[in-house]
Amino acid sequence: MADSTEQTLFILAEEGIHVELTRAHLDAGAVMNKVKSPKAGAIVLFAGTTRDNFNSKPVKELQYTAYPPRALQTLLTIARTMKENHGLQGIALIHRLGVVPIGEESILIAVSAPHRQAAWRAGEEALEECKAKAEIWKLEEFGGDEGGVWRANRDGAEGVRVDSKEERIDGFA
């Protein structure tokens, strides 16, 4: 099995900012370490996980794909905006690509700030911005003969049903 360094597809980082697309399992502790600062009184971590159902349908797994050059730039823009608007010490946005089984994390967002209110607000706003703007798509694989649905990585977004393996593409991921 490849180590996590070989599975990391893209990283952009600058002072207090880390954004990444990876096929590796996500490590919450490592992500929190990226935003730690002696000036921060709070670190907020959000972990988005694959659940076993969607609209009462059993979900087998999720598969994420992206247009990495654009998605990474979008994540960087979001991180810069959150850092500036909320006075953050650090922010890390890491999204997993490829197959994400039930119960595993697909996204980790960590933010650090001098005070907890700014960290809470920035963490939630960063998630909503990622879901609304990042060029990342998911295939929800349903159990049985249901097939799957490609959709933008947004809550409530309409999807396009795929019934056969030939209709599934891995895109750039």
Image (tube, grey):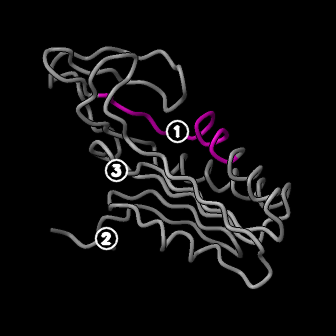
Q: Closer to us: mark 2 or mark 3?
A: 3
Q: Which residue is mark 2?
A: 4
Please report the residue visible at 56 percent of the width from the left and 66 percent of the height from the top. 12
- Cα distance between the residues tagged 1 and 3: 21 Å
Q: Quadrant of the N terminus?
A: bottom left
Percent position of residue 51, x then y: 36, 36
User: Which residue occupies the foreground of this view, 49 or 35?
Assistant: 49
Secondary structure of the residue carrying numbered label 1: loop
Residue 117 shown left or right of residue 142 in the figure: right
Q: Which sits earlier in the primary sequence, circle 1 or circle 3?
A: 3
Residue 46 shown left or right of residue 139 in the figure: right
Percent position of residue 159, x then y: 42, 17
Q: Which residues are magenta?
A: 126-140
Report which quarter residue 110 is drawn in.
Answer: bottom right
Please report the residue visible at 48 percent of the width from the left and 74 percent of the height from the top. 30
Q: Closer to us: mark 1 or mark 3?
A: 3
Q: Which residue is mark 1?
A: 135
Percent position of residue 134, x then y: 57, 41
The amino acid type of the residue labelled 3 equals Glu
Query: Please, is residue 60 above or below residue 146 in the view?
Result: below
- Cα distance between the residues tagged 2 and 1: 23 Å
Answer whether residue 134 is magenta in the image.
yes
The amino acid type of the residue labelled 1 equals Glu
Secondary structure of the residue carrying numbered label 3: loop
Please report the residue visible at 52 percent of the width from the left and 20 percent of the height from the top. 157
Asked if the residue at tag 3 contacts the one at tag 1, i.e. Cβ–Cβ closer than 8 Å, the answer is no
Query: Please, is residue 79 above or below residue 32 in the view?
Result: above
Asked if the residue at tag 3 contacts the one at tag 2, i.e. Cβ–Cβ closer than 8 Å, the answer is no
